[in-house]
Amino acid sequence: MATQKSGDALVDFAVTWEPFGGAPSAEVFVEFGLDMGEYKRRLFARLSKPDRAGAIGPELRGRLIDYSLRAVERPRRFGCA
């Protein structure tokens, strides 16, 4: 299966990791220097502009928007209830 490319590094990264449920936060940090919350905010902003993500199909775009809107899991702190 050929990977769809948008020409936007952030969107292309999300497309690459989409079949796996999204990129791990460590990969996002290494690639972009962003925490997961900021990565998802930026991804949503870019996907919200059809001209920026027009090269990817509408179904994939919809899945990536859903992914970008999912809450970021916060790491559990030991000793806290």
Image (cartoon, grey):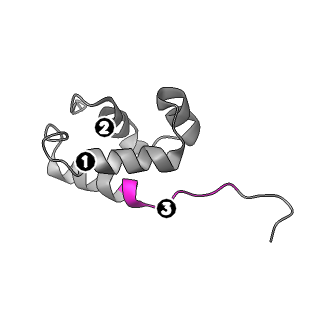
Q: Which residue is mark 3?
A: 71
Q: Quadrant of the N terminus?
A: top left
Residue placed furthest toward the bottom? 81
Q: Earlier in the sequence, mark 2 or mark 3?
A: 2
Label disc, if present, on residue 47 of the rendered structure: 1
CA gap, disc 2 and disc 3: 18 Å
- Residue sitting at 16 percent across and 45 percent down? 57
Within 10 Å of the Cα at label 1, are there few (<14), some (14-19), or many (20+) other Cα atoms? many
Q: Are marks 3 and 1 in contact (CB under 8 Å)?
A: no
Give the mark nearest the N terminus, 3 or 1. Answer: 1
Judge left or right: residue 70 versus residue 27. left
- As measured in the structure, the alpha-carbon distance from the residue carrying label 3 to the one carrying label 1 is 17 Å
* Amino acid residing under circle 2: Val
- The amino acid on which the numbered mark 3 sits, given as a three-letter code, is Ala
| Residue 32 image offset from top left, x and y in percent | 47, 30
Q: Mark 1 or mark 2: name the one nearer the start of the chain.
A: 2
Compared to residue 20, the image places residue 81 above or below, namely below
- Per the image, the residue denoted by label 2 is 11
What is the crowding at mark 2: few (fewer than 14 residues within 10 Å), some, or many (at least 20)?
Answer: many
Per the image, label 3 sits on a secondary structure element best described as loop
* Residue 36: in magenta span: no
Judged by its main secondary structure, the magenta piece is loop
* Picture quadrant of residue 11: top left
Over which residues does the magenta segment extend? 67-75
- Residue in view at x 30 percent, y 55 percent: 65
Residue at horizontal 21 percent and vertical 33 percent from the top: 4
